[in-house]
Amino acid sequence: MLKDRLIAEFRSFRYKLNTSHFKLIRLVFVVSIFISIPVTVYLAQKGFFKTTQAAVTATFSFSPNTFILPSDKTVSLLLNSGASTIGFAQAEIKFDKAALRLVSYVVGSELTRVISATDVSSANQNGSFRLAVGLEPARFTLPPSGTFEVARLTFSKVTSTPNVSKIITQDVANSQVVTLRTEEAVISPASANAIINPQVACTSVALVDTTIIGASYDRVRVRLKNNSSQTVYLTGSRITWSSTTPLTVDWFSWGSNQYYAGDSSSSPTIYNPVTVLPLPPGATGSWTADFKNQSLGGIRGTFAGELTVNQSCSYTGRITR
């Protein structure tokens, strides 16, 4: 009958319409997934996710945060976001273009997608380098948190003027960190001190004495005095020994700064501070090498502590017990 045919045709048309509608919805959904990633990163970069009260904080830092430059030096830009997982980070690094030059940069291993980066030539013309990086979509299930490296920056000197100190800064106003939950973090700034062409006569720094100290007589101490008018920097250290009993180095320190904790049984044990350690004008600095698990009799043998200042001046203190 005509009525039955009309009903059948209507049902067939409705089925085709529903099927096409479902395919359209599925297509729109898939396309939206592919579009959302770059759009989200773009909006984060433009500050779309800025809020009046951020739920998270993030701290940039440089490692080392003090270094000397007679030659090129590579510095890590680190980010600590605590427990928050990060999807996007931008940092602007400013430096004195009359004294420093950016040689190159390499992004870290966590936020590997480069959204934008100042070319090196422009950075050196303006004394400013801006880098924006994001999380690769394939790594959305493994986002970074805690402390991780954003980039490695290599600097060289431009000036030949001796004993120049220049601060490299991370500009908070042009930096941004966004979590995977699209929360913008409150950022704490970072800075690093570049000591360019440190020039102090090696004779201006004197070896004061070498002693064995500690309640268990388990530490070798070497003291230096800076008789110059410039701050000098401890850049290298080693301990060499000859003993009839096995010995293990536990740590090195410069004053109260313990910068090496190694458990080394090899003589010599060598370790250079990551961040150079200062010795101000007129001051006496104490370097200590600690040997672990010593009996009440303490360490016995011949010991030599060798310290390097400004990468060019060496001083060796020796003692036998």
Image: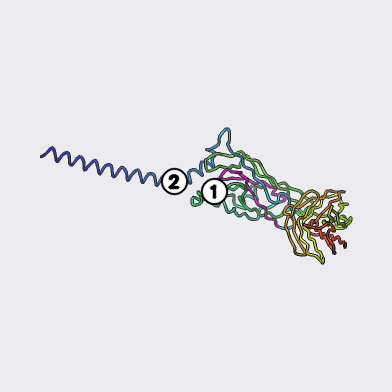
Mark 1 in CB contact with mark 2 (< 8 angstroms)? no
Quarter assignment of residue 171: top right
Say which mark, if any, is on residue 143: 1
**Span of residues in magenta:** 72-99
Say which mark, if any, is on residue 124: none
Residue that sits furthest to the front in the current view: 296
The residue depicted at 73 percent of the width and 52 percent of the height is 275
Residue that sits furthest to the left in the current view: 1
Tell me the distance, in whole angstroms, between the alpha carbons under discs 1 and 2. Answer: 20 Å
Residue 59 is covered by the magenta coloring: no
Decide if residue 157 is on the left or right side of residue 176. Answer: right
Q: Position of residue 206 (x, y in %)?
A: 88, 56
Decide if residue 161 is on the left or right side of residue 174. Answer: right
Residue 96 is covered by the magenta coloring: yes
Q: What kind of residue is marked 1?
A: Pro
Q: Quadrant of the N terminus?
A: top left
The residue depicted at 44 percent of the width and 46 percent of the height is 35
Indicate which label's residue lies in the foreground, 1 or 2.
Answer: 1
The residue depicted at 61 percent of the width and 42 percent of the height is 175
Determine the secondary structure under disc 1: loop
Placement of 22 over or under 301, stated as above or below: above
Determine the secondary structure under disc 2: helix
The residue wearing badge 2 is 35
How many residues crowd mark 1 within 10 Å: few (<14), some (14–19), many (20+)?
some
Placement of 117 over or under 71, stated as above or below: above
Q: Position of residue 195 (x, y in %)?
A: 76, 51
